[in-house]
Amino acid sequence: MAEMEASTAAETPRIVYREALVRDAADQAEVFYHAVMQGAANHYSLTQRRAWARVLPREASAWAARHPLYKTLVAVCDGRCVGFLELDMAAARVETLYVWPSLGGHGVGTTLLIHAERLLLEQGFSAVEIEASLMLFERLERRGWENLGEEWVERGGEKLKRYRLRKPLSAVET
């Protein structure tokens, strides 16, 4: 995937989108941790967020080990990963999508999803699925994702609510 620049407003920093490199893994660990602990604070209890954050170690090696498993796209600002998406190409499913909390609502996650959707379209897929947290669910529904139902997932002894969503893919973004 070639590097792509986001068209940004004056107050939004310049962000480049590309495939992940091993050097992005440490930043991915931090983005994940802070997105869960800070970004999800209005949707999940502290106990739930701590259990969720412990799912993966806060170490670069844990995230680098995932790169061969998923097509990983990153949003990079000033040389640092500030958001990422892991795509299971065989299943046409977004495995993870996390953005640095202060950049939430600025289109970083949406742009990562658009790039993932394009990759899936190029491979002949007609739809994409995701299991979305409470903080992502409403945003995706507004963008045309279909709610396939509520789920509960267990993380470290804690139950967390999420939703399975599906979106038909089209060459024209809606």
Image (spheres, rainbow, N blue to C red):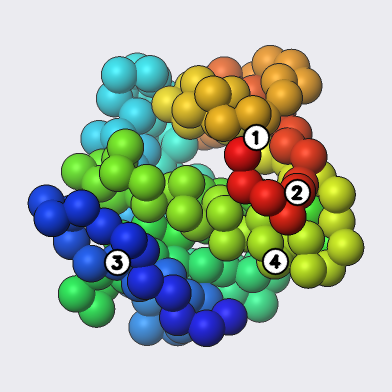
Whether 20 is drawn above or below 105: the answer is below
Q: Quadrant of the N terminus?
A: bottom right
Q: What element carries label 2?
A: loop
Q: In which quarter of the image is residue 122?
A: bottom right
Q: Mark 4 points at which residue?
A: 119
Q: Alpha carbon of mark 3 to alpha carbon of mark 2: how far? A: 25 Å
- Which of disc 1 and disc 4 is earlier in sequence? 4
Which class describes the residues within 10 Å of circle 4: few (<14), some (14-19), or many (20+)?
some
Place of residue 93 in the rendered image (x, y in percent of width and height, measured from the top left): 73, 49
Could you tell me the amino acid type at mark 4? Leu
For residue 131, the mark is: 1
Q: What element carries label 1?
A: strand
Which marked residue is nearer to the observer: mark 4 or mark 1?
4
Residue furthest toward the front? Answer: 172
- Which of disc 2 and disc 1 is earlier in sequence? 1
Which class describes the residues within 10 Å of circle 2: few (<14), some (14-19), or many (20+)?
few
Q: Is mark 3 on a helix, strand or loop?
A: loop
Q: Alpha carbon of mark 4 to alpha carbon of mark 1: how far? A: 19 Å
For residue 15, the mark is: 3
Which marked residue is nearer to the observer: mark 4 or mark 2?
2
Q: Quadrant of residue 79?
A: bottom left
Which marked residue is nearer to the observer: mark 1 or mark 2?
2
Q: Alpha carbon of mark 1 to alpha carbon of mark 2: how far? A: 20 Å
Q: Is mark 4 on a helix, strand or loop?
A: helix
Could you tell me the amino acid type at mark 2? Ser
